[in-house]
């Protein structure tokens, strides 16, 4: 291979350049490469280094290139590189454009296996040694064109495509930079956890409200989910979705809990809803199928947690009654279904046992119904109960066969008729009144009143038949039925809200006891 090298000086703008021409003789022709050098003296930091590598053109098997065509192609590449060194501001587009032009020309003209590669162009100071650009014939291997252009002494932009620097790369770089500068706000999911940001600051160990719901973010910034939070002497629950449970129930560990307004768990307190009352005890556990004692009373909460009000509970072979307000009836009488019952001091229904009232002995049967053991008294009471609700109070009634058949009684005729069914005639007979009946039987103090006794009220203006436990049957427009009905001595009179039946019992009338025992 014969290599000859020549140097030529020429002026390019304000710069003198030295061009080295190297001719390489090969079997099919000669190729030229040109190198320019900056004639002006510049600092090293201002040196612009360009490297342009042309892609090999496709080689036809039946064609060859002449040395003149190769030299022309090389000269074109030298000229392009020289123009690129003129201005650093335009270098990127110039290299890209010229590189495309060179490649296109090479593809059109070069039909031989000889290609121009590694055309290096460098502008440097006149005192520096010129670098040699060598164009070498080679086989049709694919090469990329690369240009590196420092924008200043501290930064470098590079493009690795024949077209030069991509505008999309620049735009992407700007977008990333803008994103980095954007402050985070609101809910953000990171690494599988949820965080909350306010102007780029992560919320930690604090609360925030989103769409009317309250959320808590723990000390590490993560959203609390399925999490109990305790503070200010209260317990709160944040659900699986993160929102605080307000006015709702939570079930776990076989227990039920209630979280009220503000999310506070109800501990040792009552909750009323759906017509029922519930109790949540220590630790917020709802009391289910259990007893609660307070204020000297006992309460029972059923399996669904609702308090038993006005109902019976059976267990351990006994029956219990829980009345108004859920209070268990202890050592007290209870009247229902026309019968009197008694519940012992432990709340159990008295069955097959003696029961005492005012020093008087009763008997509680197997079903709990109270009797005196005196058949006469019980017959009179049973007859009296058959008239309940049949007809309204009728003054003067009950003294003829017709009015009796029509169930038309007043108070004195009613008790007379009841005891007549048991074979007992009250003083005055068919025409008995309160003024005659008060002399019937034997007088006893009010404190000793017994089931079956007659008692007089309102200065002997009214009479009733005592059933025991404070209950009595009578015929009055003030009874629940407006006729024959049952009241308690502690019931208030409709016409006298401040008075009870007990208040108007006459202890004596004309020196006669207000209570008469007739059987």
Image: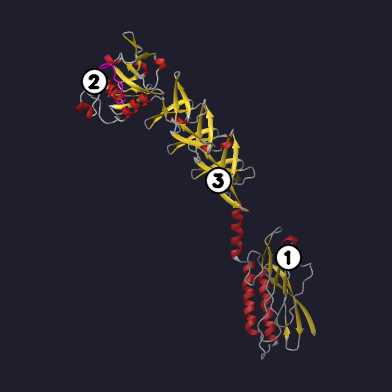
Q: Nearer the viewer, mark 2 or mark 1?
A: 2
Q: Which residue is mark 1?
A: 40
Quarter of the view holding residue 43: bottom right
Q: Is residue 329 left or right of residue 13?
A: left
Neighbor class of circle 2 (other Cα within 10 Å; few <14, some 14-19, many 20+) is some
Q: Nearer the viewer, mark 1 or mark 3?
A: 3
Q: Quick one: label 2 or label 1, which is nearer the N terminus?
A: 1
Q: Nearer the viewer, residue 206 or 115?
A: 206
Q: Is residue 74 magenta?
A: no
- Secondary structure under the numbered disc 1 in the rendered image: loop
| Residue range (magenta) | 421-435
- Residue 359 at x, y percent in the picture: 45, 18
Q: Which residue is mark 3?
A: 239
- Residue 199 at x, y percent in the picture: 57, 45
Q: Quick one: label 3 or label 2, which is nearer the N terminus?
A: 3
Image point (64%, 82%), residue name: 107
Image point (76%, 66%), residue name: 125
Q: Quick one: label 1 or label 3, which is nearer the N terminus?
A: 1
Quarter of the view holding residue 472: top left
- What separation in Å lies between label 1 and label 3 (alpha carbons)? 76 Å
Q: Which residue is mark 2?
A: 430
């Amino acid at each position: 291979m014969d290599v000859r090298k020549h140097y030529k000086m020429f002026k390019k703008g304000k710069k003198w350049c030295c061009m080295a021409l190297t001719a390489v003789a090969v079997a099919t022709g000669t190729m030229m490469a040109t190198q320019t050098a900056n004639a002006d003296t510049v600092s090293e930091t201002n040196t612009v280094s360009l490297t342009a590598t042309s892609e090999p053109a496709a080689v036809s098997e039946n064609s060859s290139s002449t040395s003149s065509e190769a030299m022309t192609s090389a000269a074109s590449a030298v000229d392009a590189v020289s123009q690129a060194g003129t201005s650093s501001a335009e270098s990127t587009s110039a290299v890209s454009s010229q590189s495309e032009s060179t490649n296109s020309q090479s593809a059109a003209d070069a039909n031989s296996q000889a290609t121009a590669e590694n055309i290096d162009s460098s502008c440097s100071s006149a005192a520096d040694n010129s670098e040699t650009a060598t164009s070498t014939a080679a086989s049709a291997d694919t090469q990329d064109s690369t240009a590196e252009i420092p924008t200043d002494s501290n930064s470098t932009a590079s493009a690795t495509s024949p077209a030069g620097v991509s505008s999309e790369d620049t735009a992407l770089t700007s977008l990333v930079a803008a994103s980095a500068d954007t402050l985070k706000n609101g809910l953000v999911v990171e690494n599988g956890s949820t965080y909350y940001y306010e102007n780029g600051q992560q919320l930690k160990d604090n609360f925030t409200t989103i769409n009317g719901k309250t959320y808590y973010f723990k000390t590490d910034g993560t959203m609390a989910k399925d999490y109990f939070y305790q503070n200010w002497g209260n317990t709160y629950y944040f659900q699986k979705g993160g929102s605080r449970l307000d006015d709702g129930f939570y079930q776990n560990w076989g227990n039920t809990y209630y979280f009220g307004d503000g999310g506070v768990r109800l501990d040792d307190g009552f909750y009323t809803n759906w017509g029922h009352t519930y109790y949540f005890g220590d630790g917020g556990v709802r009391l289910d199928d259990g007893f609660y004692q307070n204020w000297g009373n006992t309460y029972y909460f059923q399996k669904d947690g609702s308090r038993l009000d006005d109902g019976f509970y059976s267990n351990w072979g006994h029956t219990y009654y829980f009345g108004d307000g859920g209070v268990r009836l202890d050592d007290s009488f209870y009247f229902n279904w026309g019968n009197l019952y008694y519940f012992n001091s432990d709340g159990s229904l008295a069955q097959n046992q003696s029961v005492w009232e005012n020093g008087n002995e009763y008997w509680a049967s197997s079903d709990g119904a109270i009797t005196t053991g005196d058949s006469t008294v019980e017959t009179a009471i049973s007859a009296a109960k058959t008239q309940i609700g049949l007809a309204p109070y009728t003054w003067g009634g009950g003294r003829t066969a017709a009015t009796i058949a029509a169930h038309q009684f007043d108070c004195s005729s009613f008790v007379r008729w009841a005891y007549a069914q048991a074979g007992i005639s009250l003083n005055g007979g068919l025409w008995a009144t309160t003024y005659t009946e008060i002399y019937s039987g034997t007088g006893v103090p009010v404190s000793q009143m017994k089931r079956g006794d007659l008692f007089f009220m309102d200065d002997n203006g009214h009479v009733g038949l005592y059933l025991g436990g404070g209950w009595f049957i009578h015929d009055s427009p003030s009874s629940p039925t407006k006729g024959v009905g049952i009241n308690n001595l502690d019931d208030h009179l409709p016409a006298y809200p401040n008075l009870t039946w007990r208040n108007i019992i006459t202890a004596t009338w004309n020196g006669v006891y207000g209570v008469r025992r007739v059987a």
